[in-house]
Image (spheres, rainbow, N blue to C red):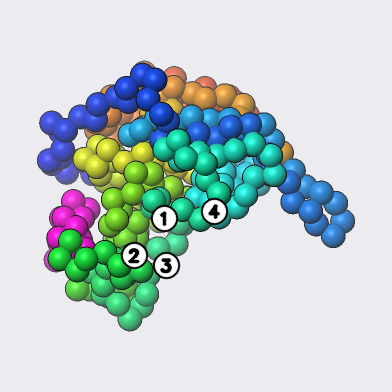
């Protein structure tokens, strides 16, 4: 569970005060029109995410968590309010993000390496640069020895590592993750949490993670955004108060972790349980 961490000395520096946020969501609302009625998915949502920060978003099903990620990616336009990436208003699909979904969505006929390189082909990244970056990501994510394996030869966790490599290949300043480990078994999910924390510290990428797991949110994030039932709005942002480097078992036993998860559960009206 706690493999040697080659990034232990690479503790991420905090964002500079007053610096332009990596992500700014400014008083956003999203409304959909159906045949029967208008539906408000999000209402009055405002959030700043600092460069290099890891923010998790939790809330009940249907509260608009995934919709929020789509707004940041430019896949959906807000009905009101504005979204900014690096100080630039989002007006359509963005190429300067990485996106990881619940399913790895790998191409069955391509090896792990060639699935990662698909990103380079789509973005016309020079071949030498793409190969070097792929080799680096394979090493960082522990995929060494499996780079030539096909998806059906990989476990669910390994498939998600390939998807993560693919999302990080072009070195995006912002990584969006929508329930990336939701389909994995509990043990593999814990292992992937440890790996993601390590990769985040190494790359310094700004991360926005949507998850239903309170434990996962508090273990990974600097802050946890708790959303209300639909129409989704931010109920509270919980500061986790943990160092960037997090050994799994020790973190879960810490007072700061218990305080953060307790507060999140109280906000969600949840009872202590395995999540």
Residue depicted at x 41% and y 55%:
95
Q: Nearer the viewer, residue 251 or 5?
A: 5
Q: How far apart are marks 3 and 1 (CA)?
A: 19 Å
Q: Residue 92 carries which label?
A: 4
Note whether 143 is above or below 57 in the view shown. Answer: below
Which secondary structure lies at badge 3?
loop
Could you give the CA–CA distance between mark 3 and mark 4, rounded to whole angstroms?
23 Å
Disc 2, disc 4: CB below 8 Å? Answer: no
Looking at the rendering, the stretch of residues picked out in magenta corresponds to 130-145
Left/right of residue 92 with respect to residue 108 in the rendered view: right
Residue beneath label 1, please? Answer: 95
Residue situated furthest right in the rendering: 36
The earlier-in-sequence mark between 2 and 3 is 3
Upstream in the sequence, badge 2 or badge 4?
Answer: 4
Marking on residue 105: 3
Q: Residues within 10 Å of mark 1 (few under 14, many from 20)?
A: few
Q: Mark 2 — residue? A: 123
Q: Which of 72 and 137 is in front in this view?
A: 72
CB within 8 Å, label 2 to label 3? no
Picture residue at 29% right of the left edge, 55% below the top:
170
Report x, y in % for residue 209.
44, 42
User: Residue at (19%, 58%) from the top-left corner?
Assistant: 133
> Around disc 4, counting alpha carbons within 10 Å, would you say few (fewer than 14), some (14 to 19), or many (20 or more)?
few
């Amino acid at each position: 569970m706690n493999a040697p961490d080659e990034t232990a000395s690479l503790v991420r520096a905090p964002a500079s005060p007053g610096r332009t946020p990596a992500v700014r969501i400014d008083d956003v609302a999203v409304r959909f029109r159906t045949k029967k009625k208008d539906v408000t998915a999000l209402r009055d949502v405002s959030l700043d995410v600092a460069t290099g920060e890891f923010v998790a978003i939790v809330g009940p099903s249907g509260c608009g968590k995934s919709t929020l990620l789509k707004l940041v990616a430019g896949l959906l336009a807000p009905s009101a309010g504005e979204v900014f990436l690096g100080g630039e208003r989002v007006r359509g699909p963005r190429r300067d993000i990485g996106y990881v979904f619940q399913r790895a969505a790998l191409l069955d006929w391509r090896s792990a390496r060639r699935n990662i390189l698909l990103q380079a082909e789509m973005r016309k990244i020079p071949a030498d640069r793409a190969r070097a970056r792929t080799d680096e990501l394979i090493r960082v994510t522990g995929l060494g020895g499996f780079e030539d394996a096909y998806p059906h030869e990989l476990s669910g966790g390994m498939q998600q590592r390939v998807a993560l490599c693919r999302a990080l290949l072009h070195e995006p300043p912002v990584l969006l993750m929508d329930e990336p480990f939701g389909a994995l078994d509990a043990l593999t999910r814990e292992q992937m949490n440890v790996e993601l924390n390590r990769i985040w510290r190494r790359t310094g990428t700004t991360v926005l993670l949507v998850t239903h797991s309170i434990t996962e949110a508090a273990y990974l994030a600097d802050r946890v955004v708790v959303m209300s039932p639909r129409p989704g709005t931010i109920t509270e942002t919980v500061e986790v108060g943990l160092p960037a480097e997090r050994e799994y078992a020790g973190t879960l036993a810490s007072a700061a972790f218990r305080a953060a998860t307790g507060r999140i559960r109280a906000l969600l009206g949840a009872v202590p349980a395995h999540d």
